[in-house]
Image: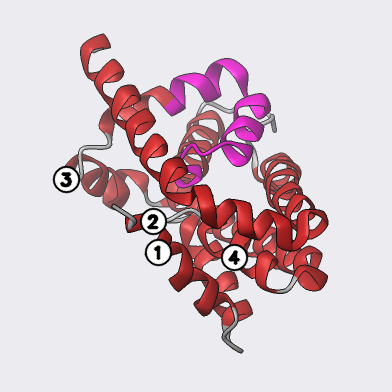
């Protein structure tokens, strides 16, 4: 079933739209707050469609993503108890928030880099960073790795590494990469779904 080939072709066509940079910027911003679809879904096809603008697109995605993460951080810092906690409970994200908070307490900025570079939901990392920073402030602790300025700097590092790596690989891969990617996109897509299912089952059994 060539489900992912159709999605891929749609993204390629969308990436050629004159408003594509606006779509990319907007999706990068909201992905760091609540949007479940990764930025890569839009960024990669845009870089394939216009390799000469790949670095520019990576820059837009990085800046917008970090700005969105700052908003997510603010939500965790100021609004977690009155508002965000209810949403987390309603959608069943308590375990994800608890795990992210534990990792942030233990690893600090290192986990922020991991969260911003890997497919982990960065919105969870941003909100939890703000939440923990507010708790530290309430305890009278000094500025640390999870406070706003270090959070922004580390976010730029992680997000930038991820998006610029994608952009540069595609830019120098050129048309041959586009052909190979389209040829194997269904295999990649189904394997990704299988891996997600395996990890989900693992965490369910582990709990």
Q: Residues within 10 Å of mark 1 (few under 14, many from 20)?
A: some
Q: Kindly state the secondary structure of the residue where label 2 is placed.
A: helix
Residue 121 forms part of the magenta stretch? yes
Instruction: Quote the CA–CA distance across marks 2 and 1.
Output: 5 Å
In this view, the residue in front, 175 or 161, is: 175
Instruction: Quote the CA–CA distance across marks 4 and 1.
Output: 11 Å
Segment tinted magenta in the rendering: 100-123
- Mark 2 touches mark 1? (CB < 8 Å): yes
Residue placed under numbered mark 2 in the picture: 4
85 left or right of 139 in image: left
- Mark 4 touches mark 1? (CB < 8 Å): no
Q: Main secondary structure of the magenta part?
A: helix
Residue 165's mark?
none
Quarter assignment of residue 145: top right
Residue placed under numbered mark 3 in the picture: 90
| Residue 90 in the image: above or below residue 54 | above
Q: Coloured how?
A: secondary structure
Of pointers 4 and 1, the one earlier in the residue sequence: 1
168 left or right of 194 in image: right
Q: Residues within 10 Å of mark 2 (few under 14, many from 20)?
A: some
Of pointers 2 and 4, the one earlier in the residue sequence: 2
Q: Residues within 10 Å of mark 4 (few under 14, many from 20)?
A: many
| Residue 63 in the image: above or below residue 14 | above
Of pointers 2 and 3, the one earlier in the residue sequence: 2
Q: Kindly state the secondary structure of the residue where label 1 is placed.
A: helix
Residue placed under numbered mark 1 in the picture: 7
Residue 202 visible in this rendered orientation of the protein: yes
In this rendering, the count of numbered labels is 4
Residue placed under numbered mark 4 in the picture: 45
Instruction: Quote the CA–CA distance across marks 2 and 4.
Output: 13 Å
């Amino acid at each position: 079933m060539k489900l992912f080939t159709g999605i891929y072709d749609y993204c390629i066509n969308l990436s050629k739209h004159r408003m594509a940079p606006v779509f990319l910027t907007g999706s990068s911003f909201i992905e760091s707050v609540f949007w479940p679809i990764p930025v890569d879904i839009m960024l990669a096809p845009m870089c394939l469609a216009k390799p000469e603008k790949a670095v520019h697109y990576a820059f837009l995605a990085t800046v917008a993503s970090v700005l969105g993460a700052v908003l997510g951080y603010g939500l965790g810092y100021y609004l977690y108890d009155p508002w965000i906690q209810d949403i987390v409970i309603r959608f069943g994200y308590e375990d994800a928030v608890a795990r992210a908070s534990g990792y942030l307490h233990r690893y600090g900025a290192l986990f922020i880099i991991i969260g911003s570079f890997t497919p982990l939901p960065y919105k969870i990392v941003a909100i939890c960073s703000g939440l923990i920073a507010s708790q530290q402030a309430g305890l009278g602790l000094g500025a640390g790795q999870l406070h706003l300025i270090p959070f922004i700097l580390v976010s730029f590092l992680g997000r930038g590494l991820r998006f610029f790596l994608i952009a540069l690989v595609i830019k120098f891969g050129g048309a041959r990469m586009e052909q190979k990617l389209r040829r194997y996109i269904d295999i990649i897509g189904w394997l990704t779904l299988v891996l997600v299912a395996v990890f989900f089952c693992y965490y369910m059994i582990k709990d």
